[in-house]
Image (spheres, coloured by chain):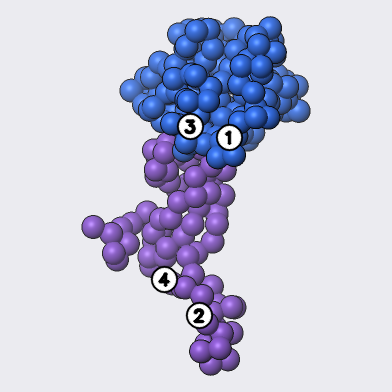
Chain colours: A blue, B purple
């Protein structure tokens, strides 16, 4: 019996890593950052994820990377914040379908129940022993891993869902 | 397997964490303690039978360093002597 899921390797996204105090980051980036831990918000087409204390990720379509880079001005940012473009370091997979949570649970120890990890949740955890960013999306999940592990994770997903 | 309470993420599986070792007493001034006390501080790792205070790093999570008390007999995370 196989799982009723669809897995896809997603195209590269523009990703920026924000570190620093919320007040300074919001003032510099002009983005409203999510307040609740491990939650994301969608703001003018970009996804902003609160992934750690004083730590956020911005994700947007790759064609907005240059625009965002010129808007965020990482090299001119105040000394007490850090903005780093990390677009090519992460590979995203989408796992969607009625059994998406079961497939994620094979490789991720996190509690994925709706009451614990509801819509708009995002968190770093592990996926098949690799550090991974897990996001809940309406039809399932998205998982991001370091790009050097992407082929391995794709292989594991193929085997898990065969 | 231990379920470790991360202050940012909530309870998470031990496999997301890296053990940071037991919390050691404050570093004494080497000039004001005996050689025996200094060697004791440098070389003896706290290893009680019972509650021990430990540091853990949520390395595959939010990156927070946290301190817990763990009972070495049961692996239960317990309240420390000074916890309310």
Residue A24, disc: 3
| A6 lies left or right of A39 | right
Badge 1 sits on which subunit? A
Badge 2 sits on which subunit? B
C-alpha distance separating marks 1 and 2: 38 Å
Element at badge 3?
helix
C-alpha distance separating marks 2 and 4: 24 Å
Residue A46, x across and y down, in percent: 54, 12
Q: Earlier in the sequence, mark 2 or mark 4?
A: 2
Tell me whether marks 1 and 3 sit on the same chain: yes
Tell me whether marks 1 and 2 sit on the same chain: no
Residue B28, disc: 2
Of labels 3 and 4, the one closer to you: 3
Q: What residue does disc 4 label?
A: B49
Tell me whether marks 4 and 1 sit on the same chain: no
Mark 2 and mark 4 in contact? Answer it, CB < 8 Å: no
Of labels 2 and 3, the one closer to you: 3
Pointer 2 local density, CA inside 10 Å: few below 14, some 14–19, many at least 20: few
User: Where is the C terminus of chain A found, in terms of image quarters?
Assistant: top right
**Number of residue marks:** 4
Of labels 4 and 1, the one closer to you: 1
Q: What residue does disc 1 label?
A: A78
C-alpha distance separating marks 4 and 1: 49 Å
C-alpha distance separating marks 3 and 4: 47 Å
Mark 1 and mark 3 in contact? Answer it, CB < 8 Å: yes
Pointer 1 local density, CA inside 10 Å: few below 14, some 14–19, many at least 20: few
Pointer 4 local density, CA inside 10 Å: few below 14, some 14–19, many at least 20: few
């Amino acid at each position: 019996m196989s799982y009723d899921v669809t897995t896809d390797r997603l195209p590269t996204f523009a990703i920026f890593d924000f570190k620093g105090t919320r007040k300074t980051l919001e003032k510099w980036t002009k983005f409203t950052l999510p307040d609740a831990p491990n939650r994301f918000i969608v703001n003018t087409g970009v996804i902003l994820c609160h992934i750690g204390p004083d730590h956020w990720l911005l994700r947007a379509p790759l064609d907005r990377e240059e625009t965002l880079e010129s808007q965020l001005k990482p090299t001119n940012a105040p000394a007490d914040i850090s903005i780093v473009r990390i677009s090519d370091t992460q590979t995203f997979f989408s796992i969607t379908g009625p059994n998406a949570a079961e497939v994620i649970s094979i490789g991720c120890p996190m509690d994925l129940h709706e009451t614990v990890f509801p819509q708009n949740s995002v968190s770093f955890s592990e996926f098949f022993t690799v550090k991974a960013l897990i996001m809940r999306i309406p039809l399932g999940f998205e998982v991001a891993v370091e790009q050097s592990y992407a082929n391995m994770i794709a292989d594991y997903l193929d085997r898990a869902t065969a | 397997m231990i379920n470790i309470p991360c202050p940012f993420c909530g309870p998470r599986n031990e496999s997301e964490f890296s053990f940071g070792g037991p919390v050691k007493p404050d570093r004494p001034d080497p000039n004001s303690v005996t050689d025996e006390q200094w060697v004791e501080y440098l070389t003896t790792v706290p290893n009680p039978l019972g509650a021990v205070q430990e540091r853990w790093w949520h390395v595959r999570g939010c990156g927070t360093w946290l301190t817990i008390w763990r009972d070495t007999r049961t692996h239960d995370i317990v309240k420390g002597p000074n916890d309310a």
